Image (tube, grey):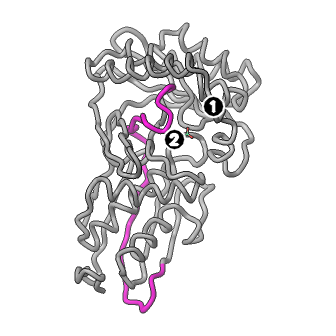
Amino acid sequence: MRNSRGRGTRPGRRVVAVAPASSANLGPGFDVFAVALERPMDRLTLSAEKSSKTEALLKVRGVSGVSVRAEENAASYVALSMARDRGIRTLLRIELKKGIPVGVGLGSSAASSVAAALAVGELFELELSQTELLRYAALGERLSSGTAHYDNVAASLVGGFSVTINDGDRPHVISYSPPRALKLCLATPVVALPKRKTEFARSLLPSVTKLSAAVHNLSMASAIVSGFARGDVELIGYGMRDEIVEPARAGMIPGFHEVRRAAIQSGASGVCISGAGPTLLAVADSLKTSPQTILKAMLSAFGHAGVEATGFVTKVGAGARVVSS
Ligand code: HSE
């Protein structure tokens, strides 16, 4: 199996890549900020067999809700797009073990797409740059949400708190390590949302905004970046206040204001919608407060609003990696 640049792969070789969940926006950083979560993760195993065409056989295990059709699943779509782009004719065998729940704002499609991009790059020795990997992975986001936004794929690929700088279509990521005490409390309500939830959540957004709201968001986004640069959890949480995107989406999440208030009253430094929701993310300084107590308060506030919810506590984690090759 050779690609157009003469590179090939050893028959029988298998590559395994893992990619973490992520939480995008952090309030004011719409489509630019995200954090990689230490857990959960997706795991993708890839091998290739002889074929005169570029095709894929996909097997999905783990959480439900993802398409099992190769052309409709983010991971296999990314793998096929890469193979076609590089002129590689082969049968791609993809086994995707989904650890990340789908459609709840935890970057599930992004993780699958990143794992696929890494695995294809490794299997065919494509020596891809960070920008190329991001662009390929973002094809999976375009498939899932209609827009090739880079925030989730950036965090899932690079890890840490990621800032995507993208002038035109040359995304570049700057990643910051988290302060040690930073903990993330994630509460996911059980709400009925449209199937293409992110596309729906994006359709709610205003096309114009007031200058005062833009200035507010710029100021808050700067607080978040400064908070990571200084290792200051309070400053990170302080910056998680968005006047543009969240007000337009809050109605998707019953109990949003009550859960936010409950988290802050229990000691959270800041609260925001995780990506396009409906999960809510609270950040906590574990030296000053108990993240488990905050999570309990969030779940109980959802309960009072008549909404069932589940949650977990984690921290900012590393990016995707090839674990076996
Ligand atoms: N920035 C994207 C959005 C993230 O909020 O629509 C989607 O996970």
In the rendered image, which quarter is residue 236 located in?
top left
Q: Quickly name the residue at label 1.
A: 208
User: Which residue is more in the foreground, 57 or 109?
Assistant: 109
Q: Tell me: residue 102, above or below residue 10.
A: above
Residue 187: percent from left, percent from top: 57, 29
Q: Tell me: residue 217, above or below residue 6.
A: above
Residue 316: percent from left, percent from top: 36, 32
For badge 1, the amino acid type reads Val
Mark 1 CB near ligand 1 (8 Å cut): no
Circle 2 Cα neighbour tier, 10 Å, few/some/many (<14 / 14–19 / ≥20): many
In the rendered image, which quarter is residue 105 located in?
top right
For badge 2, the amino acid type reads Leu
- The residue located at (41%, 31%) in the rendering is 314
User: Which residue is more in the foreground, 130 or 255?
Assistant: 130
Q: Which mark is on residue 106?
A: 2
> SS class of the residue under badge 1?
loop
- The residue located at (42%, 23%) in the rendering is 221
Marks 2,1: beta carbons within 8 A: no
Residue 305: percent from left, percent from top: 74, 20
**Residue 42 among those drawn in magenta:** yes
Q: Is residue 312 left or right of residue 118?
A: right
Q: Magenta part of the protein: which range?
A: 27-55
Image quadrant for the C terminus?
bottom left
- The residue located at (22%, 65%) in the rendering is 127
> SS class of the residue under badge 2?
loop
Q: Is residue 68 left or right of residue 37?
A: right
- The residue located at (68%, 42%) in the rendering is 203
Front tag of 2 and 1: 1
